[in-house]
Image: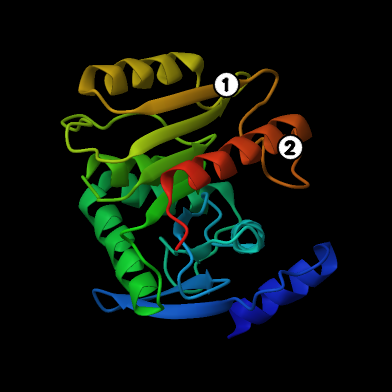
Amino acid sequence: MRFLLGVCLLLAAAGPVSAFSGSAVTYRVNGQAYEGYFVSPSDQAPFVLLMHDWDGLTEYEIKRADMLAESGYAVFALDLFGAGVRPTKVKDKRQHTGELYQDREKMRTLMQAALDTARDRGADPENAVAAGYCFGGAAVLELARSGADLKGFATFHGGLQTPKGQDYGKTRGEILIMHGSADRAIGLDEFAALAKELEKAGVAHEMITYGGAGHAFTVFGGDRYQETADQRSWKRFTEFLANQLQNE
């Protein structure tokens, strides 16, 4: 439980902790251990599957999960890299994300395993939205293209390119894209290309750009954090959740 202890210490240092008690969840996929984080305000709460960025599951996603729990949502912040794998060097981050970009079936398997694990914890994947940041945003769109039966898919400054041979023909839920106009890692040409793809496929979608916002504009304390874009995108995200999910 060292992961959970570290998260608690970091959140305590950052400010108030959620009133709801979240916990680390260890689960296995094809023999490998993974460690996610689950938090829920009630047994009937609508569900959000949360995808981490290329750092792996860290205190950032835990904080976002707790924020969502405070708003009435059950959240499972999954682990796409493996228990204890939280890369800090750029070359290692590229290695772990690159392995999954090259093996899309594994990425899909890991996301489905996370949904199954969340269901075992009492979450309702039939009343769910998937959301992700940066690399996690690319994973969310992968899940959307897989035909996963979720109510919606939301990305914050996420990867937008569609792999060769894939399309949005199987996508079921609505897509929300929140992107920085000043993002140098993922340009507006990719943003426009995705808009054309979604329109061609007939997928319900909304795509928003935030002026002056660069990549990773939501990451608290980061050198590219932009408060206005963060607050506006979070507000739109919570509206999207309220519109897509049923409160039971």
Which residue sits furthest front?
Answer: 248
Q: Amino acid at mark 1?
A: Thr
Q: Amino acid at mark 2?
A: Tyr
**Residue occupying image coordinates x 53% and y 74%:** 42
Q: Quadrant of residue 205?
A: top left
Residue 145 disc label: none
**Residue occupying image coordinates x 69% and y 37%:** 230
Q: Position of residue 187 (x, y in %)?
A: 50, 19
N-terminal label among 1 and 2 = 1
**Residue occupying image coordinates x 30% and y 54%:** 107
- Residue wearing tag 1: 209
Note whether 137 is above or below 122 in the view shown.
above
Question: Which residue is nearer to you in this view: 144 or 127?
Answer: 127
Question: Which residue is nearer to you in this view: 246 or 125?
Answer: 246
Note whether 58 is above or below 102 in the view shown.
below
Q: Which quadrant holds the C terminus?
A: bottom left
Note whether 88 is above or below 83 in the view shown.
above
Q: Position of residue 184 (x, y in %)?
A: 58, 22
Asked whether residue 51 appears in the rendered view, the answer is yes
How many residues crowd mark 1 within 10 Å: few (<14), some (14–19), many (20+)? Answer: some
How many residues crowd mark 2 within 10 Å: few (<14), some (14–19), many (20+)? Answer: some
Q: CA distance from mark 1 to mark 2?
A: 15 Å
- Residue wearing tag 2: 225
Q: Which quadrant holds the N terminus?
A: bottom right
Q: Is residue 103 left or right of residue 231?
A: left
